[in-house]
Image (tube, rainbow, N blue to C red):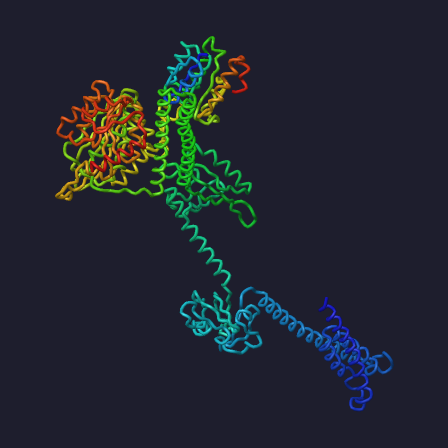
Amino acid sequence: MRVLVADDNKDAADTLGMLLRLWGHEVRIAYDGDSALLLAHRFKPHVALLDIQMPKRNGGEVALQIRRQSGSEKTLLIAVSGSDPSDPRLARYKGAFDAFLSKPCEWERIQELLADYRSHTRESMRMYS
Amino acid sequence: MESMRGQGRQYGLGYLVAIAATAAVVLVRWFVLADVFGTEAPLYLFLFAVAASAWLGRLKAGLLATALGALVGTYFFLAQNGWVLVGTIDLVRIVLFLFSGVAISWFAESIYRSRDRADQQRESLRIILESIGDAVITTDAEGRVTLLNPVAATLTGWTPAEAAGRPLEEVFHILNEWSRQPVENPVKKVLSEGRIVGLANHTVLLARDGPERPIDDSAAPIRDAEGAIQGVVLIFRDMTERRHAERIRTRLAAIIESSEDAVFSKDLDGTITSWNRGAERLYGYSAEEIIGKSVALLYPPDHLNEFPQIMERLQRGERIEQFETIRMRKDGQRFEASVSISPLKDDNGRVIGASDITRDISEYKRLQQQLQEADRKKDEFLATLAHELRNPLAPIRNALQLLRLAGDDKATVERALTVMERQVQQMVRLIDDLMDVSRITRAKLQLRKERVDLTTVVRNAVETSRPFIEMAGHELTLTLPKEPIYVEADAARLAQVFANLLNNAAKYTEQGGHVWLTVEKTSGGCHPSGEAVVRVKDNGLGISAEHLPHIFEMFSQVDHSLERAQGGLGIGLTLAKHLTEMHGGTIEASSEGAGKGCEFIVRLPQMDVSSVGQQPITASSASKAATGQCKILIVDDDEDTVTSMSMILRILGHDTYSAHDGEQAIEEARLHRPDIVLLDIGLPKMNGYEVARRIRQEPWGKEVKLVALTGWGQEGDKRRSKEAGFDYHLLKPVEPDALEELLKDLCSDST
């Protein structure tokens, strides 16, 4: 699968990318919101793991923009954030994501989400949102 | 009823007396005096019966006795044969007798009547004197007590019977309340001066039975019809209650007057009727200028609508308690007020006005807001802290997973470990900052101050921050004076100040910006030996005027958006400020606004050069004293290696410098004169062997310990490094323990 990873903590993005590659995915990495959106447009990822707090454009905005792109209906959007999920600043982005993971997220959880995605349509994944 | 019955009895008795007396006269005249009088004085003796009856039975009894006397006397003694009268002389006798009897009866009656009147007058006077609320004592012309009413008896402690006839001074014993000296008796004065006399104030009456009471009195002469003084009437009253009430009133007035709150009263149309000192202070109007004016003057125009509402509620008798609103001073300044208004009622319970208490709660409100603000900041800080701690944990967990999966893949393992080190270091730094802030706020941080060269401290700070500045691609312009500037400081802590400022500049400047650090001396300033001034300037995001005053506050972060480029806890500048102040210095921030960069200026007192003494402490020995360890230059083209190694060495207490290529390595070595150089062999621009050879050619390079770090461990490689001038040859990846061991030896050698 094509997976987009965006995180302004380069170590976090890089290591997650390495893990995903080891697992056989095709990975692109962005370190800020604008690059993430650009990559999403070009790379057409199946899955995007987006940090929320990022310079230039936050992960929530990136998710909203991705949702507006045609052909992105089936993209699995996962928020990966160090913020409290109940943070009111996140409320408006909740709908754009299929799942919300708190940092540091468990690798097994990501694997699980990706495996489910592979075998189901995105709609059935809604239970994670 | 009682007197009617009494009168009835008196009349009944009178009639009996009339009958009995008439009968007695008949008997006496008939049997005893018949020989004496013969036919003479047939009626005359009956006048005694009339007099007796009238005396005992008043008018009616007298008249009955007269009538009976006339009838019986005529029948028995005047007429000869039954009722036959002899001549006109007899008729004259009868008429004279009747006339005399009526006159005697009438005379007796009038005596009775005048006596009744006198009794009534005396009785009503007695009742008046007894029921009067004031004490009354009368005396005769010699000043002896003649009368004492019940109130006077109670106040003096004398009964009327005991007091009667005694000199007034004995019964009416008065003193001056304060001097305790007897006061001149008013009765004497009245008797001598013949006019009405009032008592002076503060007179107390000492009762016979002990208690003393403040009194108020006056005395007047009693004169007879001719105007001669017959005696004196003294009227006085107990003033205890009134004095008490007055005292309470005075005290209440004093309390209101001294109240910090504004207390005033108003009538029902809102006209101010009283105004205390607190009101003068709070509202700025004096009592003279505001009394009689409308209370509406105290309402700001946009709160005037409260006025009718308040008046309406007051008229219903409602209290308004601690109503928070805005009021206005004389100068138009508004303030936050807590207002309590209570209706004032007259004796009939009718609301006639209101008392109004205003308290200025601006300060309270400000504190409340401050508390709320602090609370909000604390919450934000906790959220930020969680975020900042989670952030490095994510790559660490990823790296752990990588280690698990990497197997024999050396490069991946190396990469994962580097990441973990870097991120752990990030967390350690975070926690160190937290601990420092905590120590500072609890005043537990202790500085080990000594004489140090500020330029050295600044260089150390630059080395600490260089990775951040370089990672962000900023250009750093360093301007240091050639002369050392001595300050009394804890070198490590002072370096932390400048490192924090540099990190801050690096953080809040867009990639590829410019950071300037300038150190200079000034002779002026607040300190006699001049000031050292360190400026850290950038062309970054700047600070808006709104945020500038709060920039040094704990947990203060200008940008709370999700697009915030940099993490951090918002404590770096707080630390810098506290540490600067602990060094007797000041720190200030200036910015021309958002997007226009900013400048931080630290001013520190310079040490008096003359006190530096004969053997100035050199920069290097000062810094070494501060750390007690070595200066080490780390040269590697892999940034992660440099960072992690520098981290470890700093934890061990060494000063580290770094370079990423061969040429830079020689530059840095020339600048910092390190004790040890850890040199990677495979370097860009100039390889490690060449760098080692060049350093050895320098005059300062003979004593430097050179350690080769390389992935090649063959015998030939070792020989080659030895030939180039290396002292040691370590294999990568370097075990921290082995490195520590080696450094322990090298450092004790070099010092």
Q: Is residue B97 left or right of residue B150?
A: right
For image coordinates 30% across by 21% down, the residue present is: B510
Q: Is residue B427 left or right of residue B664?
A: right
| Quadrant (top left/top right/bottom left/bottom right) for the C terminus of chain B | top left
Q: Picture coordinates of residue B384 (x, y %)?
A: 41, 30
Q: Picture coordinates of residue B463 (x, y %)?
A: 25, 29
Q: Is residue A42 visible?
A: yes
Q: Is residue B637 left or right of residue A89?
A: left
For image coordinates 33% across by 40% down, the residue present is: B440
Q: Is residue B593 visible?
A: no
Q: Is residue A105 above or below residue A119?
A: below
Q: Picture coordinates of residue B8 (x, y %)?
A: 75, 70
- The residue lying furthest to the bottom in this view is B35
Q: Is residue B338 above or below residue A98?
A: below
Q: Picture coordinates of residue A5 (x, y %)?
A: 41, 17
Q: Nearer the viewer, residue B133 or B554?
A: B554
| Quadrant (top left/top right/bottom left/bottom right) for the N terminus of chain B | bottom right
